[in-house]
Image (cartoon, helix red, strand yellow):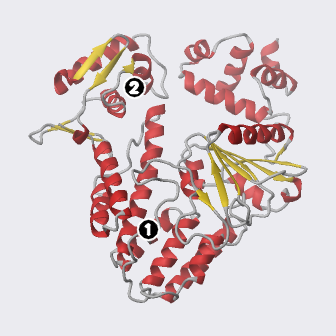
């Protein structure tokens, strides 16, 4: 059989006959099983996937058994049941997610070996598997995490394709690929740097200069900063070096590859040292693009150097739900750039001074300045990452939020649902019982509580209840 998730869900038999789940909940069940192919998935996780953003009915477990029975009629005994869960057996060549990952790995390996045409073929074949936005409309944890990884893989495949085309002397084709990437992610400086380089190698110097001026204008308008060292180096490299006019292939081994990945695509430690900035990948943008949950940024506020806080906020991450907390010194509070960062979705606080420049990604990776301002060091050692997180949290607690919504003004209007939820929680209800009373999911309860705590400037639920009373939010329920 063939299972396709890189676009709308599709299932085909070995004879090419399409199998379509008759109901949305059946499709959600099949999607959840495919995202965990060959692994046992707990009943609770399947129920959350089927009824995401909806109230779970009392008959959920019974309904799930019915859905499994219906799927088994179509898929056969490859859908197995066990104690507390279900499993769908899938061969690696049957699931398009696995095929795309294998092709991406083959493209990376071929590129490192200097086999540029083969690398381009693998990357193009992988991109051809995409039929639309994967997992669109599914909002359970596995779907969100996988969609984020697939977005990153899709972007990386375009970059691998462009690098392979450059290596093969097909600079004009690489330009077309890179232009598309800059249109989708106009704040990603590493892509602009490669576009400028590709234009130079295609002999299109004027267009390279125009591309530099365009990204310069975008960064100034959105973040109030000048282009970083990577883009600047690409601009200075226009028209220099042999082979650029003709688009000739580089010598084997000279093609830039992601500095944070080994030949098999697995993350590795990276160190970018000072002197002349790298002409290809710095690795920082790639690390940020791989963030799954949270990014902490501590910045002096100048925006220069490789870790400048103004430029190291990946707004694509914010759009897909990665939390950004950014610390600046008080001196940057009135710069106007901070207000733009807040409007774009970052949480910003200021303190008297920021003691160091640092980025921490998912509390597992720390990016710190190197010995020169043009370089950085990337650490995955707990002995480095943990102290950086603790320092950030200590300053964050004392920092002054930029958003005027924290704390709220007297008279802030609550929705009926928010008011009912506050009343239930103050009366001692658990998240589960509050969800049942309000007819919403537990995850929705927790999201509402998080939003209320943020608006109240509260660090605990108890404090949120007390502040809600102080603000008069619950006075009409007190009597």
Residue 312, visible in the rendered structure? no
- Front-most of residues 82 and 378: 378
* Residue tagged 2: 50
Camera-nearest label, 2 or 1: 1
Q: Helix, strand, or loop for circle 1?
A: helix
125 relative to 14 in the view: left or right: right
Residue 442: percent from left, percent from top: 56, 21
Name which residue lies at 39% across and 62% down. 160
Where, by quadrant of the figure, is residue 84 drawn? top left
Residue 256: percent from left, percent from top: 47, 67
Residue 276, visible in the rendered structure? yes
Above or below for 27 versus 358: above
Q: Helix, strand, or loop for circle 2?
A: helix
Packing grade of label 2 (10 A; few <14, some 14-19, many >=20) is many
- Front-most of residues 394 and 226: 394
Q: Which quarter of the rendering shows the N terminus?
A: top left
Specify which label sits upstream in the sequence, 2 or 1.
2
Residue 79: percent from left, percent from top: 24, 22
- Front-most of residues 105 and 422: 105
* Residue tagged 1: 180
Q: Which quarter of the rendering shows the C terminus?
A: top right
């Amino acid at each position: 059989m063939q299972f396709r998730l890189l676009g709308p869900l599709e299932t085909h038999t070995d004879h090419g006959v399409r199998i379509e789940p008759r109901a949305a909940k059946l499709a959600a069940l099949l999607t959840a099983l495919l995202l965990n192919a060959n692994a046992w998935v707990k009943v609770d996780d399947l129920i959350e996937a089927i009824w995401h953003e909806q109230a779970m009915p009392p008959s959920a477990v019974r309904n799930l058994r019915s859905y499994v029975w219906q799927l088994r009629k179509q898929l056969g005994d490859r859908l197995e049941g066990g104690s507390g869960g279900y499993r769908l057996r899938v061969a690696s060549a049957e699931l398009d997610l696995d095929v795309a990952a294998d092709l991406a790995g083959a493209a990376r390996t071929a590129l490192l070996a200097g086999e540029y045409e083969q690398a381009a073929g693998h990357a193009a074949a992988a991109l051809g598997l995409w039929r639309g936005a994967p997992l669109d409309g599914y909002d359970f944890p596995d779907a969100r995490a996988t969609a984020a990884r697939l977005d990153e893989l899709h972007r990386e495949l375009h970059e691998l394709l462009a690098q392979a085309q450059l290596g093969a002397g097909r600079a004009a084709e690489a330009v077309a690929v890179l232009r598309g990437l800059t249109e989708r992610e106009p704040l990603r400086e590493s892509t602009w740097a490669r576009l400028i380089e590709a234009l130079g190698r295609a002999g299109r110097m004027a267009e390279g200069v125009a591309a530099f001026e365009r990204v310069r204008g975008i960064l100034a308008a959105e973040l109030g900063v000048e282009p970083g060292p990577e883009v600047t180096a690409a601009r200075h490299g226009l028209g220099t070096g042999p082979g650029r006019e003709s688009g000739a292939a580089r010598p084997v081994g000279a093609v830039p590859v992601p500095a944070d990945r080994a030949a098999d695509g697995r993350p590795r430690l990276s160190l970018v040292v000072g002197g002349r900035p790298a002409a290809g990948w710095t690795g920082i943008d790639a690390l940020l693009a791989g963030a799954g949950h949270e990014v902490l940024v501590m910045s002096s506020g100048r925006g220069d150097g490789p870790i400048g806080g103004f430029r190291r906020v990946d707004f694509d991450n914010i759009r897909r739900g990665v939390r950004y907390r950014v610390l600046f010194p008080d001196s940057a509070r009135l710069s106007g750039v901070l207000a733009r960062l807040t409007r774009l979705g970052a949480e910003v606080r200021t303190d008297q001074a920021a003691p160091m420049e640092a980025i921490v990604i998912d509390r597992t990776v720390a990016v710190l300045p190197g010995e020169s301002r043009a370089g950085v060091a990337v650490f995955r050692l707990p002995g480095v990452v943990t102290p950086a997180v603790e320092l950030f949290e200590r300053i964050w607690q004392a920092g002054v939020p930029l958003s005027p919504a924290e704390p709220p003004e007297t008279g802030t209007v609550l929705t009926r649902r928010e008011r009912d939820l506050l009343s239930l929680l103050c009366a001692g209800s658990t998240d589960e019982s509050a969800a049942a009373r309000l007819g919403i999911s537990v995850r929705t309860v927790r999201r509402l509580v998080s939003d209320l705590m943020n608006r109240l400037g509260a660090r605990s639920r108890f404090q949120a209840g007390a502040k809600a009373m102080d603000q008069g939010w619950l006075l009409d329920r007190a009597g």
